[in-house]
Amino acid sequence: MKGNRILVLGRFLLFTFCVSALSAQQGTWLLKDKSSGEPIAFATILTGPDTGTISNSEGQFSIDLDKIGSARVRISCMGYETLELDRAQFIKAGNALLMEPAAIQLSEVRLSNRVLTAEEIIAMARQNLSANYVPEGTPFQLFYREAEKMQFDRLDLELEKASELNRKDLQQADARLRKLGDDIVKSNVRSFLDLSGAFKTTGDSLSILRVDRVTQLVDFNEDYSLDNIQERAQHIVLSHLDTTQTYKVKSGLFKVEDSISLGDEFNNAGPKDSMNLAELKSRATGMADLAGWKEESRLRKLLDPDLYRYTLLKSSFFDGNYVYAVRFEPDRRKAKYSGTLYVDANTFAVLKADYRFASGRTGEKVNLKLLLGIRYEENLSSGTVIFRRSETGKYMPYFVQRATGNYIYLHRSLTFIENSRDRKKVRFDFLLEGGERQTESALFRPLGADAAGQLSQTPQPERVYLVRLDHYEPTIWQDTEVIEPLEEMRNFHVRGD
């Protein structure tokens, strides 16, 4: 009995030691404003010359203290005094760090005997673009996250005609369709995708992407993308048909025909364990473009006085330097955004840009509701782009985040016609009204010359392996600089079948 107690005690001490060692290595902290107590979003946390992370929109970040060693961690954020902490100070602070606001008076920011106007500041920023920023095509280590959410206000699924189905089958199919519609409207559809790798643009649209790891959190029981909704409804109808037959499918006003085999349709169901590399390249390219200064890029347009009018706000402070805060508003019909540009008072580099649709402005619109049963409107577009100065004096992308959203109305009828002499028909109708919200975030770190050369030789396969998870696993990213997930993602779990 005594030996068993000693064994149990030994196991407990070993477990405690392992947990303590693990918690000492990896820690999560919350950044807060010392005056207000509010979380501080998008603060830069540097653990070395080209390494670090950023606080998320809830003010949280994680780092591995054992990798820091005797070095000091530098934390900086627009409008706050910079913090420099060593490993001991992190441990002593617990899980919360306070940052001191560092507002200054506009009259203190001078390059000559007068304060520059907002228009002059923007002109200087535009004039110094080539001198301030690393050239297009610079290779980066990349961490990318995508979070999607669907919200359905209305979904009607109804059988309109079924010449092959008897009354009982017709009632069963109709009831299943209506239940599917109810379940989808009540659902909270979410998915998360994380990607780590390396990236380099090689032209206007081409890129090289090395994928080190890509994971996805999604509950396939509640995967209600537009394509998936149609597939599920279609599956319900097809389950009552003769699987030995083939059918023509007619959809929409133009009666586009396609021949399908029900056996093939059922065999192709189920989640896939890979992703198309071209899709991931498109995501990476999109985030890099948001931080680029090409002639037609979003940031370049924000510096165009023919599109926007500017107002100088109270100046700010970042990492020991004075910063101009310049408000921009649309001055022409084709200008869509309002927000703030933060411009370094010495180099005139844009350090940070915050933007969103201006009041009354929206994005792309398609209204073919009467003709094709389709209406679409982009009603949300906002973002933050943060640059960091490298040891060479050039500024490079550090963090990019954008949020997009839309309104969708879709009314469609599908008719299945049996390829036989009888030409039996089944037609069902669905009407969907709702919206989609997507948030994308990217953390960039420049690659050294050797790594950049190796990246150019990276094979570009058609598909890459995808790890599907049922909950967030921080241990997967132990050796990767990541963006700390938000509470919603940390609490996500796939429900059992």
Image (cartoon, rainbow, N blue to C red):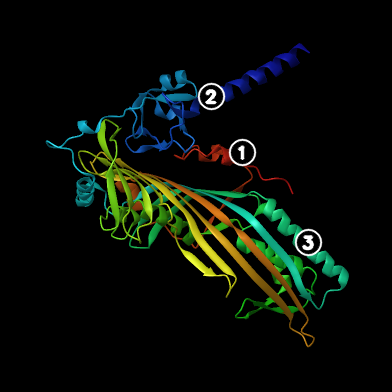
Above/below status of 497 relative to 177: above
Q: CB under 8 Å between callouts 3 and 2?
A: no
Q: Which residue is mark 1?
A: 491
Q: Quadrant of residue 308?
A: bottom left
Q: Which residue is mark 3?
A: 176
Mark 3 or mark 1, whichever is nearer to me: 3
The residue most toward the left is 113
Query: Residue 293 location in percent, x, y?
Result: 29, 54
Within 10 Å of disc 1 (Cα), the crowding (few <14, some 14-19, many 20+) is few
Looking at marks 1 and 2 on the same chain, the residue that comes earlier in the sequence is marked by 2
Q: Amino acid at mark 1?
A: Asn
Query: Residue 448 location in percent, x, y?
Result: 31, 45
Q: Nearer the viewer, residue 215 or 457?
A: 215
Above/below status of 223 relative to 391: below
Q: Which residue is mark 2?
A: 21
Q: Amino acid at mark 2?
A: Ala
Q: Which residue sits at x=48%, y=56%?
A: 280
Q: Which residue sits at x=60%, y=49%?
A: 190
Looking at marks 3 and 2 on the same chain, the residue that comes earlier in the sequence is marked by 2
Within 10 Å of disc 2 (Cα), the crowding (few <14, some 14-19, many 20+) is few
